[in-house]
Each structure stands twice: as structure tokens, then as C-alpha cells.
């Protein structure tokens, strides 16, 4: 089973349990798994690689909407989107087995798999939000929490300590954030601590903020500057970067005295270094020749 799907399952099962639909979710997955075995026509349609995933997702929703738990409908639709058509029955069987085996437990993946599983978990959590305003709120809170960690070595070390129990680290986060941030933000932070993502907490939360921006069809740009950037300059920068990456851009400014002057801009894998420090380094290298 794909790690992306495993993460989505973790979040969906949490939500189903919170709504007292945990058993219903299991029954719905078992029922569809059995239907795929016994009904050749259904199996043929949902495993046909010639039918695009959007169509197969629509078929799943038409079949199950109002007849199954909403978490089951969304989970099966997501499975159509991320799994190859021919693997769909196997994926459903694996999801059912994982749900029965690990319900109520937090399964910690390895570091390599953890980031992809986190993407799946975040996809579900963000999907549950009511609208763009809430997604924007979560994006902002995740980015600000990354900045807090970046500037507080003691807190970062405490949350990244592999010797400290997960429950202890989550209590620290609850004390800091509970009642002050959106519930979705708290869920995502808690999952990061539970799912073995402590090696680079700052980078992980920045990545989650970027995922939230992508959920709204936008890209997140981090701008490091020695001084604050006013709203007009921020808007001009957002427009220029938007033309460059061909998507709307959210600009988040990080005040960093080490920049000296100018700005260091990061949008995904794109890095634009317009700092005075870079120009000084190039001048120094030229003089050394």
C-alpha cells in the first residue's frame, strides 16, 4: 500500500472514530472488498486502466454516497486517484486489513516513508476544512510555528528529542497551541511528532504550510530579508513570482539579519538569491582570482 494512502487512511479513521463511525468505516471497506470479488462488472469498471481516475472516482461516489460513511466514500475516491486502476482491489483489501489491525494505534513509518505518509495525512485533514479561509488560517499557523521553532533551539530540541516519549512531546505542543490555533493545525503538529518526523521539524512544518497553499491552488514563497517588507512591495513580489511559476503565490516574509540586504526567495525548488551577501561573496571570489 502506498504511504500516501496510508497517511490518508490514518486521518480518515481518526475522523470516523471521532464521529463514532469507526466500525461503520470498517464494514464499508469490507463490503466493497467483497463486492469487487463477487461482481465482475464492478471489478471490470474500477480496474480498467482505460477509464480515467476522475471517472472511476465519480462511479465510486455515485455507488456509495448516502449508503456508506462519508470517510469511506472519500477514502475510496482518494484511492482511485493515487492507485493504479489494476491495483484498486488489492489496495482496498490492504486498507481494510490495516484498519482492522491498527485501529486505535499510531503506526510509525520509517524516515523515508514518513514524509509521503505525512502528505497523505495532511491531504485528508485539509480536505475536511470548510473553505479557503480555514485553509489559509492553517497555512499561516503552520508557517508561524515553523518560525517559532527556527528561533527557539530549546523548544526545537525538546520536540525533536527521540528519547522523550511522544506523549510528553505532544503535551508540550498542547500546552503551547491548544485553544490558540485551528484544530487542524494541532492535528498536523501532533501527527508530525507521532510519525517519526523529528529530524527536521522546521522544514517539515514549512512543507506542510506549502501543502496548505497548494490546496488552494497557490504556491508558497519564503522571502528572507533583513528588514520588513511593506504590503505594496509584498504584492509586487507576489505578482512577479506568480508570473515566474505560473501560479498565484503567497509571500511569507522571514526577518533574517544574516541576509544583510536584498532578499533570498524560495518557491519550492526555485531559489532566487538577490542578497548583498551573495554579491559580496562573488566579489571576494573574483578578487581572489
Image: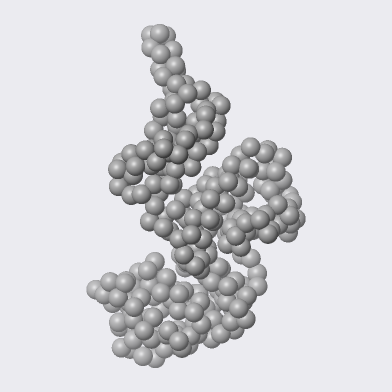
Q: Is residue 49 visible?
A: no
Q: Position of residue 162 (x, y in %)?
A: 69, 49
Q: Give the camera-side residue of 71 and 249.
A: 249
Relative vertical location of residue 200 with respect to residue 107 in this rendering, above or below: above
- Residue found 48% across the figure and 34% down from its top: 229
**Furthest residue toward bottom:** 38
Q: Position of residue 41 (x, y in %)?
A: 31, 88
Relative vertical location of residue 93 with respect to residue 214 in this rendering, above or below: below
On screen, residue 162 versus residue 50, left or right, reads right
Q: Quadrant of the C terminus?
A: top left
Quarter of the view holding residue 43 = bottom left
Q: Give the camera-side residue of 133 and 268.
A: 133
Q: Position of residue 275 (x, y in %)?
A: 44, 25
On screen, residue 54 versus residue 104, left or right, reads left
Q: Give the camera-side residue of 106 and 147.
A: 147
Q: How many marks?
A: 0
Relative vertical location of residue 285 with respect to residue 239 in this rendering, above or below: above
- Residue found 57% across the figure and 51% down from its top: 141
- Residue found 36% across the figure and 84% down from its top: 62
Relative vertical location of residue 234 with respect to residue 212 in this rendering, above or below: above
- Residue found 68% across the figure and 38% down from its top: 153
Q: Is residue 214 visible?
A: yes
**Furthest residue toward left:** 50
On screen, residue 18 versus residue 89, left or right, reads right
Q: Position of residue 253 (x, y in %)?
A: 50, 38
Amino acid at each position: 500500500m502506498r504511504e500516501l494512502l496510508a497517511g490518508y487512511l490514518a486521518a480518515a479513521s481518526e475522523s470516523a472514530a471521532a464521529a463514532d463511525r469507526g466500525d461503520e468505516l470498517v464494514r464499508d471497506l469490507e463490503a466493497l472488498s467483497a463486492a469487487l470479488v463477487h461482481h465482475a462488472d464492478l471489478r471490470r469498471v474500477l480496474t480498467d486502466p482505460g477509464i480515467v481516475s476522475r471517472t472511476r472516482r465519480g462511479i465510486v461516489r455515485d455507488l456509495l454516497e448516502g449508503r456508506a460513511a462519508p470517510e469511506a466514500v472519500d477514502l475510496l475516491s482518494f484511492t482511485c486517484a493515487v492507485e493504479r486502476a489494476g491495483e484498486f482491489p488489492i489496495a482496498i483489501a490492504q486498507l481494510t486489513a490495516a484498519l482492522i489491525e491498527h485501529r486505535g494505534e499510531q503506526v510509525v513509518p520509517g524516515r523515508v516513508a514518513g514524509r509521503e505518509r505525512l502528505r497523505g495525512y495532511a491531504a485528508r485533514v485539509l480536505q475536511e476544512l470548510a473553505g479557503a479561509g480555514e485553509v489559509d488560517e492553517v497555512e499561516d499557523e503552520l508557517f508561524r510555528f515553523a518560525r517559532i521553532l527556527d528561533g527557539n533551539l530549546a523548544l526545537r530540541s525538546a520536540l525533536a528529542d527521540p528519547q522523550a516519549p511522544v506523549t510528553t512531546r505532544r503535551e508540550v505542543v498542547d500546552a503551547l497551541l491548544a485553544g490558540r490555533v485551528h484544530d487542524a493545525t494541532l492535528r498536523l503538529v501532533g501527527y508530525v511528532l507521532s510519525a517519526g518526523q523529528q529530524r527536521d521539524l522546521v522544514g517539515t512544518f514549512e512543507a506542510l504550510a506549502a501543502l496548505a497553499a497548494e490546496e488552494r491552488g497557490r504556491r508558497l514563497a519564503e522571502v528572507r530579508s533583513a528588514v520588513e517588507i511593506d504590503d505594496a512591495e509584498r504584492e509586487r513580489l507576489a505578482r512577479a513570482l506568480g508570473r515566474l511559476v505560473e501560479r498565484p503565490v503567497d509571500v511569507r516574509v522571514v526577518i533574517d539579519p544574516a541576509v544583510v540586504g536584498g532578499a533570498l526567495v524560495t518557491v519550492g525548488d526555485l531559489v532566487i538569491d538577490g542578497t548583498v551577501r551573495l554579491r559580496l561573496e562573488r566579489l571576494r571570489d573574483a578578487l581572489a582570482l
